[in-house]
Amino acid sequence: MSAPAVALQPVPRCGERLPIADLPRAAEADVMRRRLAVAFLALPALARAQERKTLEECIEIALRQQPTLRAAAATVAAGRERVWQAAAAYLPQVSASYLASRRHASSSSLIGSGGLEKKANTFPFYSTGATLSQVLFDFGQNLELIHAAQASAEALAADADTQHDTVVFNVQQAYFMLLAAYRLRDVAEETVVQNQKHLDLAEGRHDVGLAPRIDVTTAQVQLAQAELNQLTARNNVSLGRETLRNTLGLPGPLDFDIVDSLEQPRSEVSDEEALDLAYANRPELRSLAAQERADIERIKAIEKDYLPKLALNSNVTWNGSTYPLQQSWIFGGLVSLSVFNGGLTRAQVGEAKANLENLRATEDGTRNNVTLEVRQSLLNLRQQAESIGVADKGLEQGRENLSLAEGRYKTGVGNIIELTDAQVALVSAEASRVQALVGYRTALATLERSTAHRFGTD
């Protein structure tokens, strides 16, 4: 029995189109070749960008490199030195002096005797001495000034914490926006590949007379638009990397990549928990509370100007025109009391009390703003969490719709408009999911900023 005949397909010559039945396989082979070429060209870049840093590592870099944090640390250090300045008034004060001069006077003027003036002479004169003073009792005025300086230093430290939280939040925003740029770039590149496949399919159907010329031109327009979007997406990646570099405080280029951390478990936070955390942790509130304590201590210190002060004074001097010099010393106590200073103390107390009332009103307003920020952050977080589920569903439907549209067009049931609409809808669904993920992570970072508490770790 002879073997069954096998129908051999002719091999197309260069420049010929494949039969319409072989178009899907040809398109898939072309897509595969393109992907292999892109992967081959990207190998050197991948080798250079092997190092990837997490969000926490980027935050650590920013905390080391950001100039604003160094400035805040210097401000805190200056506040601590002012505490020592206030404490110096409680310690003994010692000073020394030495004077060498030439004088022109008569002997009678030097001894203070009357009678006839004797001839004046020019002679050298030397004076040296040391002075010691010590506050013995001031009704606690210096102590209250020390407490005021300490509270002011605490306020500066809280302000530095505010700057710290701002830097962390800025890094989180830049990090998530760069991740979004990466994902949208991938979507744009995949869209170019899909539109190239649709163009090849339209050209193949047109060549065998199964599709009009408008199908080819429509696919070409869609491909050109996809390539333009691809250029924009690649530029957005470059802009995102530069933004992250600046946020980290790096003077040179960003020589590492970042880890994609958009897919994270959802965090559940109640309103009461978030508000309690914000009231307890927000550095702005701690700063205002410390400033209020400092103003109260200053008011007490200023009011002590109405009371007497007791100090110890001691002075030893050596004077004369020739050595050895004549010695004299003074040792005693000094009681000082301001009887009338034109109302200066009363005005200073009034100013300090007015400043304290202003600070208390500011604290109430800041507390209300913190409450608003926390509630807004919670609402946005819950909305973004729901939007992820909606975006997932839309993406699934968009992929299914594109698959159906491609099948209908291949079999001649659908048209190019239906295919391009499905492609555009899928791109929009993919972008919506990326924005939903980034929106959720940004909303969570905003909640962490408003409560000064980290809820998630990467």
Image (cartoon, rainbow, N blue to C red):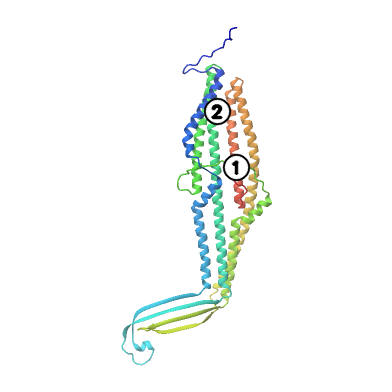
Across and down, in percent, residue 87 comes to 53, 70
Identity of the residue furthest to the bottom in this view: 115
Across and down, in percent, residue 201 comes to 54, 22
- Residue at image mark 1: 439
Amino acid type shown at disc 1: Gly
Which secondary structure lies at badge 2?
Answer: helix
Work out whether mark 2 precedes mark 1 in sequence or the reverse, and give the earlier one. Answer: 2
Q: Is residue 350 visible?
A: no
Of the 4 image quadrants, the one containing the N terminus is top right
Query: Eyeballing the image, is 311 above or below 58?
Result: below
Amino acid type shown at disc 2: Gln
Dot 2, how many residues are within 10 Å of its Cα: few (below 14), some (14-19), or many (20+)?
some
Q: Residue at x 57, y 67 (%)?
A: 147
Which secondary structure lies at badge 1?
Answer: helix
Across and down, in percent, residue 219 comes to 53, 25
Question: Residue 432 vs residue 109: left or right?
Answer: right
- Residue at image mark 2: 194
